[in-house]
Structure formats: structure tokens, C-alpha cells
Amino acid sequence: MIIAPSILSADFADLKNEVKKVEEGGADWIHVDSMDGHFVPNLTFGSNVVQAIRPHTTLPIDCHLMVENPENYISDFAKAGADYISVHVESTNHLHRTVQLIKDSGVKAGVVLNPATPVSLLEDIISLVDMVLVMTVNPGFGGQSFIPETLNKIRTLDQWKKDKGLDYEIEVDGGVNDETAKECAEAGATVFVAGSYVYNSDNVKKQIDALKEAVSH
Ligand code: DX5
Ligand code: ZN
């Protein structure tokens, strides 16, 4: 089980220490949310932030691209030190080519589903991906409420692993706290992104421990 705090809810003026803080608190990955103001109605940052934090953590950096035409940015994120790059199914006409591009860059490839996007769209690419990210809120902002209807998609993806003999991570992102993480774990999730639950606290270790405990049964 992998806990991946999202720096979207961190103090951007102190990003180096915010990353170190969750690493010391027991985080497994660092989740980075890149938004372009087109694919989602919000702006954050690009590969420059990955490059900036890369020297300050040994943890894998998990990049979630909420951008149109993500194929244009893969090489920059790979060079900046990304370990995983995930692209939205809804953001490109050429998902297969984009997944290949990620893999050819030596980075693990993830595909992301918005809450209304069905798992069935992944049928012909699932054997090529290292991870599926199931959005459990509509992407764009931290601090939203978990959408319970997304649990069925996690169950389907978990069943596919068994039926097809595949091995990929199932990541959840949005509204993840100790209660919703437990439900996601029971449904088959293996990677848990949490932004506000971890960072909107003066004790990030306590929050990370609570998530670990919630997903460990
Ligand atoms: C939302 C981002 C998330 C965000 C989650 O579009 O993809 O990674 O940081 O924030 P919380 O955990 O606060 O819902
Ligand atoms: Zn994210």
C-alpha cells in the first residue's frame, strides 16, 4: 500500500521543506498535480516544480497531468525526474501513442479516468500501463468530497487484474481520508493520494499513519 501526499495543498513558498516533512512522516511517493487552465479550470505548475523538488527527496515522484495535449510535456517531465507520469484518457486523442512515449522515456505510465469516464475505455490499453488512476473527485481542486460511485470502477479494475493476469497499481485521488481510504482499499486500490488530509494538519506524520492504518486490513 502506497501513500502519496499531494503537494497541491502544501505551502508553495516552502516546498523543499514541505516535501521533506512528508518524507520524514512516512510518505511513500510525492504526488504532483500539473494543471493547465484548459483541461481543468485551474492553474498550477509544470515540470519546473518537479525539477525543483527532485534533489530534495529520494521518494518516487508521481506526476498527474491535468493538461490538454499531454504528449507535448512528457519529455520535460521525464527529464525533470518524474518516476510516474499519468495522463487523462479524456485529454488526448492518442492515448496509446502517449503511453508509449512515457514508457520510451523510461518512466512508468499511468492513465487517469474522470469520475464520469467508464473503465471500459481502457480495455485495449490496460496490458500496457503500470497504473490506473481513478479520480474520486472531479479534477482541478483540492479539498473536495469523495464521490462514492467511483468505488465500482476500482472493483472492476481489481477484477480485471485477476481475470487478465495483469499487475498494475490502482491509484485513487480526491477526497481521500482515513474513512474513504479504507473503502478504496477494500475495493482494490493500492495507491492513495491525499492532499488536504495530510497537509492541512500540523502533524503530517499522524495523518500519514492514520491512512496507513486505514488501508492495512
Ligand atoms: C485534484 C488533484 C488532487 C488533489 C487532491 O484535481 O488531482 O491530487 O491534490 O486533494 P484532496 O486530497 O484535498 O482531495
Ligand atoms: Zn492528483
Image: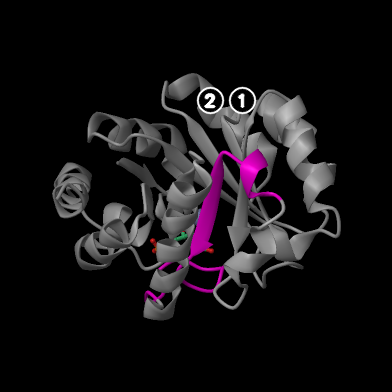
Q: From this viewpoint, which residue is outermost toward the front?
A: 163
> CB under 8 Å between callouts 2 and 1?
yes
Mark identifier at residue 81: 1
Check the image and report above or below for 170 versus 76.
below
Instruction: Provide the residue span drawn in magenta.
Output: 125-146
x then y, percent, for residue 39: 73, 67
Circle 1: element type: loop
Mark 1 sits near ligand 2, with its Cβ under 8 Å away: no
Locate residue 59 relative to residue 64 in the image: left or right: left
Query: Is 132 one of the magenta-colored residues?
Result: yes
Crowding at dot 2, Cα within 10 Å, few <14 / some 14-19 / many 20+, comes out as: some
How far from the left and from the top, in percent, is residue 50?
59, 34
Please give the name of the residue rendered at 53% of the width and 47% of the height, measured from the top-left corner: 164
Q: Residue 170: in sight, yes or no?
A: no
Q: Amino acid at mark 2?
A: Arg
Which residue sits at x=54%, y=74%?
115
The residue identified by callout 2 is 54
Asked if residue 215 lies left or right of residue 67, the reply is left
Amino acid marked by disc 1: Gly
- In the image, residue 130 sits, relative to residue 149, either above or below, namely above
- Residue 138 in the image: state x and y as whole percent: 54, 74
Identify which residue is drawn at 53% across, 25% down.
54
Instruction: Between label 2 and label 1, give the one nearer the viewer.
Output: 1
Q: Is residue 103 above or below residue 141?
A: above
Please name the predominant secondary structure of the magenta segment in the image: loop
Estimate the spatial distance between the alpha carbons at disc 2 and disc 1, rounded to whole Å: 6 Å
Quarter the N terminus occupies:
top left
Which colour assignment does the render follow? Answer: one colour
